[in-house]
Amino acid sequence: QVQVVESGGGLVQPGGSLRLSCAASGRFVSIYTMGWYRQAPGKQRELVATITSNDNTNYADSVKGRFTISRDNAKNTVYLQMNSLKPEDTAVYYCNAVVSLRLEVRGAYWGQGTQVTVSS
C-alpha cells in the first residue's frame, strides 16, 4: 500500500505566497515522478508541475516563473513553492506519485487534495 499526503494549502491574498508539501510512504522500491495537479470548480483536473527522479521539471505555461517544484528524495517528499498568486490559481491541489512497486511494475497514486484559495 502507498500513501500520498499533501499539506500546506490555505487562504492567501493575491500576490502572496504558499508552499505545498507532499510526502509518499508505504511499500515501494523507488519514486519515479512526482507532480502537482489542480482542479478548480467546474473544470477538469490539470497539470501544474512535475519533477522526475533526476530533477527534470515541467510546468504549465500558466505558472511558469511563479511556481517552483522541488523534491527531497531522502524524505520521499515534493514541494511546490507558489509565488505571485492570482485568484485564478484557486483550486484543489492534488499530489501524484509514480512509484516502482517491484521489477517492471509501476503504480500511480494520488493524495486527497489540499485547498488553495486566493482572494482579498
Image (cartoon, rainbow, N blue to C red):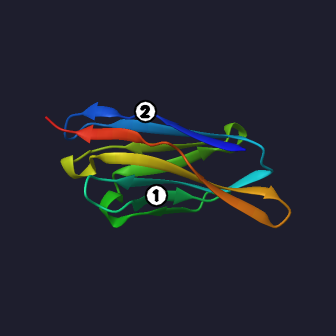
Where the N terminus falls, by quadrant? top right
Q: Secondary structure under badge 2?
A: loop
Near-viewer residue (71 or 90): 90
Near-viewer residue (69 or 28): 28
Near-viewer residue (70 or 88): 88
Where the C terminus falls, by quadrant? top left
Quadrant in the rendering for residue 98: bottom right
Q: Secondary structure under badge 1?
A: strand
Near-viewer residue (13 or 109): 109
Q: Residue at label 1?
A: 49
Q: Is residue 67 above or below residue 60?
A: above
Q: Is residue 80 above or below residue 55?
A: above
Q: Residue at x 26, y 46 (%)?
A: 90
Residue 46: x percent and y percent? 39, 62
Say left or right for 73 vs 87: right
Q: Residue at x 64, y 41 (%)?
A: 3
Query: Residue 8 — which label?
Result: 2
